[in-house]
Amino acid sequence: MSAQSLILTGPDHTCHLAERLAPCLAPGDVLLLSGGIGAGKTHFARCLIRALQTVPEDVPSPTFTLVQEYDTRAGSVWHADLYRLGSADEIIELGLAEAFETAICLVEWPDRLGNLAPPDALHLHFTPLEEETRRLDLSWTGTRWDSLVPGLAA
Amino acid sequence: MFRNDKSMAAAPLILGLESSCDDTAAAVLRGRAVLSSVVMGQNALHEAFGGVVPEIAARAHAERLDLCAEQALDEAGVTLAQVDAIAVTAGPGLIGGVLSGVMTAKGLATALNVPLIGVNHLAGHALTPRLTDGLAFPYLMLLVSGGHCQFLVVRGPQDFTRLGGTIDDAPGEAFDKTARILGLPQPGGPSVEAEAAMGDETRFRLPRPLLDREGCDLSFSGLKTAILRQRDSLVEAQGGLHAQDRADLCAGFQAAVRDVLVEKTRRAIAAYLSETPAEPAFAIAGGVAANQTLRAALEALCADAGLRFTAPPLGLCTDNAAMIAWAGSELLALGVTHDMTLQARPRWPLDRDAAPLVGHGKKGAKA
């Protein structure tokens, strides 16, 4: 397991990081976004999706619909909020397990995934510090993210 | 209401199906007469979770759709053979639900050899004021439903102009998350309103997001963060949250939502009135209209601006199939019907009725 931490000074910084990560992503990449309410998960996801869109389009919160799907220049992007899910079976019903293979997936409240969480996913955990500052803890296994993540902090 | 009106006898009998959200619904309409409207929800389960519990499995929706349709026909006192057209929500919404609705509708339309009409769920909400209040086009609409919140000028059954909308959370989501943060039951709309009634809205001054920015766009995401911070500082200072703190926080939150909605609605009204509509009217649909504080503020605003204010009854603002049957009848009157290629569209913006991007509707529940 590799890990790295960053301090995000505010929403713009979070957005900037998402925009830098976006062009590096390809179908099959899964980002697991954790942290409490208001930690900045959806904000990060929204900035990342916007950065990949060829035609600007709404990026609403997926809290009600569970999944929002986007066609982007990098392929299909799934933005999921699993907070309301009851069981892991529903992950499969939702088509999410399949999307992990075929799309770029941004998953909020990923603890609901249980053992369905892809082993090579990039974990991003947001912790509010004070006012608008957040600590972002990135962690991963496997080589996919080894070269990508350190470059983000620079 | 118009059930015995002979002029309505000529209007087609429409069966509407709705399964795009957590609930499953069917309704039978003739003209503006709602002969029946059945909604099968899962309210008992709601409180165990944050917000509503989603029904993901397409088969669960499909099973309930059959029951709903049967019950709606029974209550309307008609048989399936009498139905003139099938209207169904084809999006946007939960993928599994939309899919099962569209499949069921295709089956029924084929078996009965009647027209099939795919309806945008949001258009169903947006056209409801014509069903309930007979509003003339164009009217201004604040559509607040599920994850959506937008100002629309409604010009026709397929002609919507969006003046603005939420750039992040919808108000309903803000109410749900505020309830979650403060340990109040879900759904948050009623529980936060009840707490707010006992609170002092001036004690905590919460932000009014985007008020300083021009236009009609809304933002509610920052409010939940502000509530969270206020809660944490109270807990830190006094070791816990008193009942009065919670009520005051709810009141402050609701006041912030009210102020933002009122100011943005004021701007939307100005934009709408610049078109000099013949019969200026404002309609609000969605759970927000059930909040008495928000509703009263918007009602007063419309009275000042000389707009007729309408808010369809809540039963027709929450997800229901009568609005889908109604929207279907409006489309049918325009000659709009669909064939077996009708696709479920998880995302389907009202004001940009573009063809669905490749791949939409093919993913999702495989049940």
Image (cartoon, coloured by chain):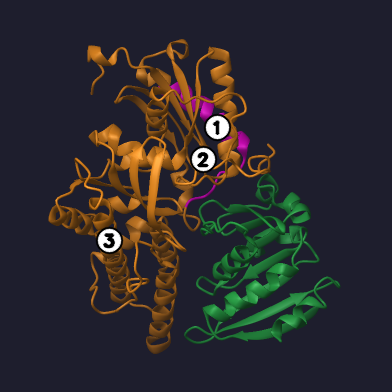
Chain colours: A green, B orange
Question: Which of the 4 quarters of the picture holds residue B165?
Answer: bottom left
Q: Do the dots labelled 3 and 1 sit on one chain?
A: yes
**Residue assigned mark 3:** B267
**Amino acid marked by disc 2:** Ser
Q: Do the dots labelled 3 and 2 sit on one chain?
A: yes
Looking at the rendering, the stretch of residues picked out in magenta corresponds to B52-72
Q: CA distance from mark 3 to mark 1?
A: 38 Å
Q: Position of residue A101 (x, y in %)?
A: 78, 54
B67 drawn magenta:
yes
Question: Contact, CB < 8 Å: mark 1 with mark 2?
Answer: yes
User: Would residue B319 be seen by someone viewing this image from the given angle?
Assistant: no
Residue at 29% in and 79% down: B205
- Of the two numbered discs 3 and 2 on the same chain, state the one appearing first in sequence: 2
**Amino acid marked by disc 3:** Arg
Q: Position of residue B87 (x, y in %)?
A: 47, 27
The quadrant in which the N terminus of chain A is found is bottom right
The one of B75 and B20 positioned closer to us in this rendering: B20
Q: Residue furthest right?
A: A143
- Of the two numbered discs 3 and 1 on the same chain, state the one appearing first in sequence: 1
Question: Contact, CB < 8 Å: mark 3 with mark 2?
Answer: no
The one of B352 and B105 positioned closer to us in this rendering: B352
Structural crowding at the residue carrying mark 3, measured as other residues with C-alpha within 10 Å and reported as few (<14), some (14–19) or many (≥20): some
Q: Which mark is residue B20?
A: 2
Q: Which mark is residue B101?
A: 1
Structural crowding at the residue carrying mark 2, measured as other residues with C-alpha within 10 Å and reported as few (<14), some (14–19) or many (≥20): many
